[in-house]
Image (tube, rainbow, N blue to C red):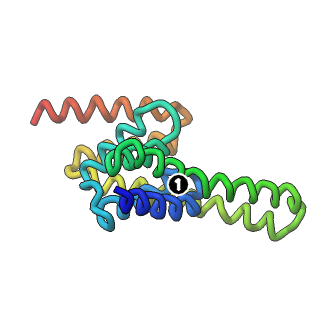
Amino acid sequence: MTGALTELARTFAMLSLVSIGGINVLLPEIQRQVVDVHGWMTDAAFAHTFAIASAAPGPNVIVVSLIGWQVAGLPGLLVATIAIMTPSCLLAFVAARALGRWSGNKAVAILRDALVPVGLGLMLASGVAMMRNVDHDMVTVAISLATAAFVIFSRRNPLWALGAGTVTNIITLHIR
């Protein structure tokens, strides 16, 4: 079990340092590490774990805690959670101090502006990766695309789209 804990800590600590835009931008790489590299879960188990984490109140970073739990129980949950949180929190603290100190510097302003499209691109990539894992027919692809369009073009709460997509999927499952 010590080997699994070490791998959890190493994997999630490294991923933590590139989590620009939050945990959702890391989903494709988390999935690759968890499913393909380490074999801790199947694609379906990963998608279900992410769905549970998304449905739970609070931040989506809970997906990492749930992965840790499935790999090594309570010690895995604690190691994975600490590993994903600590490096990025320390980096954010140092960056905030530096930004506060050098906020008038042109290079800092350029860097800050450059990170916005990087974060948005990573979020888009994670959405596409999750669609590839869970959308296996035209109905689920249509639901995902309609949900994305609703979120992009509407100012309404995204939960309306998620609820409508869920109801649509349930109805189509009963028709088949």
Residue 15 left/right relative to 147: right
Which residue occupies the extreme left position in the image? 176
- Residue 91 at x, y = what percent? 68, 59
Residue that appears at 50% across and 56% down: 25
Camera-nearest residue between 1 and 82: 1
Which residue occupies the extreme front position in the image? 2
Q: Which quadrant of the figure has residue 150?
A: top left
Camera-nearest residue between 88 and 175: 88
Camera-nearest residue between 60 and 156: 60
- Is residue 148 visible to the viewer in this orientation of the structure? no
Give the answer, above or below, for where 72 lies relative to 12. above
Residue that appears at 85% across and 55% down: 100
Residue marked by disc 1: 83
Q: Which quadrant of the figure has residue 107?
A: bottom right
Residue 60 left/right relative to 43: right
- Residue 131 at x, y = what percent? 33, 53
Q: Secondary structure at mark 1?
A: helix
- Is residue 108 visible to the viewer in this orientation of the structure? yes
Q: Which quadrant of the figure has residue 95?
A: bottom right
Residue 105 left/right relative to 121: right
Residue that appears at 37% across and 29% down: 163
- What amino acid type should be assigned to the residue bearing mark 1? Ala
Give the answer, above or below, for where 52 lies relative to 24. above
Residue that appears at 29% across and 57% down: 40
Camera-nearest residue between 152 and 63: 63
- Locate the C terminus by quadrant: top left
- Locate the N terminus by quadrant: bottom left
